[in-house]
Image (cartoon, helix red, strand yellow):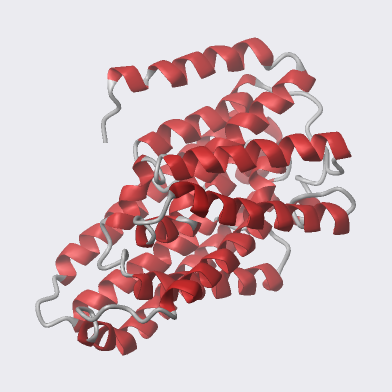
Amino acid sequence: MNLKKNELILPALLSIICWLVYPYPSVAMWCIFFMAAYSAIANDSIQTIGTFIASNSDKKWYYLWIYMGGIFVLTATYSWLNYNGDISYGRLASKGLNEAPESFKFLQVFAPVALLMMTRLKMPVSTSILLLSAFATNASSITSILSKSLFGYFIAFSIAILVWILTTNLFEKYKDNKPSKIWLPLQWLSSGALWSTWIMQDMANVAVVLPRSLSTDQFLVVVSFIFFGLGLLFYLKGDKIQQIVLEKSDIIDVRAATVVDFIYACLLYYLKVLSSIPISTTWVFIGLLGGRELAINLRKNNGNYKKALKMIGKDTLFAAIGLIISLILALSINENMRNQLFN
């Protein structure tokens, strides 16, 4: 969990840039967006394209990029056209987040850098809580996000245990058999559906500093940057945080990856329909993988449930650390929110 000395150079340079630009709102807005877009998607890539990358490691990276990048462009364009220039699918309409910031404090500009550093430490941080809480002006908006996120964690954990208690033996029975050709298109479809649903939830994280109605030029800048940022992420095969996916049982099996992506997509769509409140998809994801890992080890004859519990505890601890840092950052930035929370 240690950062090498040469890996500290980039965060140090970005911190200096944050200090230089925060007094200039028009410049700071785009700096925050560029840093937030890459760091948020790099951190959250384990949730959506992590299993896709892991189970398609034999494919050319640019095929995966063009497919997922195309889905991103289509999903973002649909929101922009149908939500009056808003690319967040209306997720920023709640009180406290419904207006773009007109000025910035240093810690607000620094928030994406903190996220980038935690990503390099392979910590599954809640980007929703970290980035949205830095710009929320109302404590109720953050408590609503927290409540919905924890609900998502427990429902994902419970559903994962139920599904894999019922299916683990079946997967084990055919584990050594070569997957049928039908599994590959099914996996690409389920991963594409998951990616699109995730964008509907999490675009709010990177759009929070942008005007709520983007002009055509602004929209093209946003979409182009994220599209090519995805290309870098696929070239790096998910970067360091991809290890969180690779350490899970049999996740590189296309059949397992397909089931994980399909269930996760259904959960995110249900939570999207449930309310327009933004949610930490990270907590939903670690709940899903945690419940799956525990169920698999309980069902296997040689399963090690203690190891599974340790893995669940580690992922949850890292996410909790990110949550604590997010709240400290939010309270440090916003005196009004601090008064609302403690009065």
Q: In which quarter of the image is the N terminus?
A: top left
Above or below, 187 relative to 339 = below
Residue 309 vertical position relative to residue 296 in the rendered view, above or below? above
Q: Do we see residue 343 in this rendering?
A: no
Residue 312, compared with residue 211, is above or below; it is below
Q: Which residue is drawn at 47% across and 37% down?
A: 325
Residue 271 position, x and y percent, is: 62, 70
99 relative to 324 in the view: left or right: right
Kindly identify the residue that appears in the image at 57 percent across and 60 percent down: 195
The residue depicted at 21 percent of the width and 87 percent of the height is 173
Residue 54 is at least partly visible in this image: yes
Does residue 109 appear to the left or right of 75 in the view shown?
Answer: left
Q: In this view, does 298 lie above or below 154?
A: below
Quadrant of the frame with the C terminus: top right
Whether residue 25 sits left or right of residue 266 in the image: it is: right
Residue in the picture at 67% in, 32% down: 33
Nearer to us in this view, 175 or 209: 175
Q: Residue furthest left?
A: 302
Q: Where is residue 4 in the image (x, y as percent from the top left)?
A: 28, 23
The number of callouts visible is 0
Query: Where residue 269 sits: x, y (%)?
Result: 63, 71
Task: Tell me where residue 267 sits by quadrant.
Answer: bottom right
**Which image quadrant is residue 279 in?**
bottom right
Image quarter of residue 205: top right
Image coords of residue 19 (percent x, y)? 60, 13
